[in-house]
Structure formats: structure tokens, C-alpha cells
Image (cartoon, grey):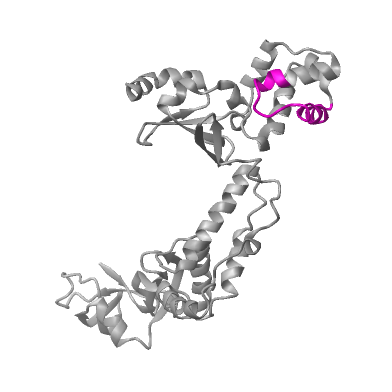
Amino acid sequence: GDYLGARQRRFWVHPSSGLGKKRPQWLMTAELVETTKLYARMVAKIDSDWIEPLAGHLIKKNHFEPHWEKKRGQVVAFEQITLFGLIVVGRRPVHYGPIDPVVSRELFIREGLVRGDILSRAKCLSANTRLLEQLDELEAKARRRDILADEDTLFSFYEARIPAEIHQTATFDSWYKTESQKNPQLLIMREEDVLAREASEVTAAQYPDTLHLGDLSLSLSYYFEPNHPRDGVTLRVPAPLLLSLPAERLEWLVPGLLETKSIALVRNLPKAVRKNFVPVPDFIKAALQRITFGEGSLPQALGRELLRMTGVRVSDEGWAEAAQQLEGHLKMNLEIVDGSGKFLGEGRDLAELTARFAEASQAALA
């Protein structure tokens, strides 16, 4: 068989050579002779591992696909080594920091620090994660993605404060340990560092974290991802309390979503009825000014005020059909847990959940 030699020359081992039939993977030759073919004479088997240390001044190195590796705490790239066009090493992972510290630093900051893909005990990272989670919850409550600054802003925060020579976890931790003793607030973000805008509409009164039902206090959480099963507001309910949960109270959700839900309800009414309440947002604003949040049924409360303003009555069936058509985030999601807090299931239909978990409720009460 033939061999591919330096500078892409193809040759054959001369038939007189003892290596002709052994076919070593790598060999070198002292002489190439052109007859009917290009033959190699005076050949010897070599190990490709010898090439790099012995011909270091002749080899070429190429690096590709730099990427952040959390476990190593470094930016790693793949190295290809060639000698006169022959691939000696095809894809060897190497530390990319010394090769390109600028690119390595950018990847370290963006992947490790901004996206949190790092194994580090630096207290600034845990503090910043908590802050970002709080602001993410603000966005979930407001159902907007314009409160928290984007990744480029977070990148700029770190990039402006970390020395240019740092591009891996070990040196970052060492530097931070020393410098944070002088400045305990080093690299700890403040709200103004990461807010794209003020979120004054998101208050504890408008978006509470707890729903009070008599003597009970149940946890509320918020999620913002349209079409996701948890999109909207989720109420965490122990199974034994399902039977005593007031369905009418759940209709009201939380104050911050009341206007949006009320507008959606009216817009879901048949056109012949809906046309009496145009523009819908104006009628809803006026109605809500005279309604006490959480008292009775939301559709009935709206219907009463709309009747007062227009003389048009909406039937119970009309409200029921309008409620059926509401998007998921405008219906309270119920997360059912057992006595120890273990997740049992979830959904937005109280009657269905009550029937599904009747046994769990009775067992807990027994």
C-alpha cells in the first residue's frame, strides 16, 4: 500500500525493504526514488510520539473550538499538530489561557461568572446569584422581561473590575480572597448595577408571596414563561386543605393581575354582549374602583358594576364560558403537597384536583 508523505507526496515502500509487508503506521525514509512509482528506500518504522519533541522547531500548531470547562476551571481548546502537512496530533485538549488570554478571559467571565457555570467559593458569586434570582422573580410577577439587565451588562460589570490577566477559576479565587479582605463589597452587585429599569409597579401588596385564608397562610410563587404548565401564579396547598379552599377567592389571583384578568374576561364574552363595554380597559378601570378585592365572585362583582354603568346584564353562563377561555396564567395554578411537603401534583381545576387527591386528604385527616 501507499503512504502519504510530507507536503502531500504519495509514495510506496520499495519491495526490497523488510518493512514492505509489515505496513507500520508511521515511517521515515532517507531516499525517494522515482521509477514506475515513487519508492521509499532505506526506511525505518517510527513512533509518532517522537515527532513533537524531536521536531518541535518544524511542527505547526493550530487551535480551535475554545470553550469553558467548569470542572477544570479553565478555557480549553483543541490542538492540532502538523509536520509538513501531516497531521501528527489531530484533536488534543489543551489549556487555552496562555495561548489566547483575551479570548479566554472573555469566556471565563461570560460562561463562568455571568452564567454561573463555575466551582468557586467566592462569596460575591452567591450574593449576586441571590440578587439576580430576586430580580428574576420581579420579572415573573410583572410578566415582563425588561427589568433585569442583559448578559452584556453583567459581563461589563465583571470585566471592568477583574484584572486583565485573570482567565481561570484558580487565579480568580486567589485574587478575590486577597482583595476582598481589603474591600468586602468587591464584585458584589447592587440593584442599580443590574436593573434595566425601575419596577415600581411590583410591590408586596400587588404581588404578595403569601395568600391569607382566615388563619391559614399559603405560599404563592410566580413564573413567567407562556405555555409552560407553571406560567402565572402558583398556590402551594397541602392536600388536606383542598376541601376547604374557597374557589371564589382563587378567581381573584393577586391584585397585580386583577385588571389584566378582568379585561380578558370581558373580551372573552360574546360580541353581542362585549360591544356594550367598549373600550373594555376603561370600563374595567371604572368597575375595579368600586370593587373590593377578594370579596365574593370576581365575575359577579364585575357584572354588577357593568350592569350599573350600562344597564346590560351578563349571564352566569356567559361569565362561565369567558372564564373557560382564559389563558393559563390568568387562572390560579394549585401545587398540591402532602403533610411533609412532598409534591403530589398540580393543576388549575380545583374540583378535579379535589377529586384526584380525595384519598390523600382523607388519609391526612384520619
Q: Is residue 303 left or right of residue 336?
A: right
Q: Quadrant of residue 267?
A: top right
The percent coordinates of residue 94 (x first, y second) are 37, 73
Rendered position, 352 above or below 4: above
- The answer to which of 248 and 333 lies nearer the viewer is 248
- The answer to which of 280 and 64 lies nearer the viewer is 280
- The answer to which of 204 and 261 lies nearer the viewer is 204
The reply to whether the magenta stretch includes residue 244 is no
The reply to whether the magenta stretch includes residue 287 is yes
**Placement of the N terminus among the 4 image quadrants:** bottom left
- The answer to which of 5 and 189 lies nearer the viewer is 189
Q: Residue furthest front?
A: 215
From where the camera sits, is residue 231 visible? Answer: no
Q: Residue at x 69, y 51 (%)?
A: 199
Q: Which residues are magenta?
A: 279-301
Q: Is residue 9 left or right of residue 282?
A: left
Q: Is residue 326 left or right of residue 86?
A: right
Rendered position, 177 above or below 143: below
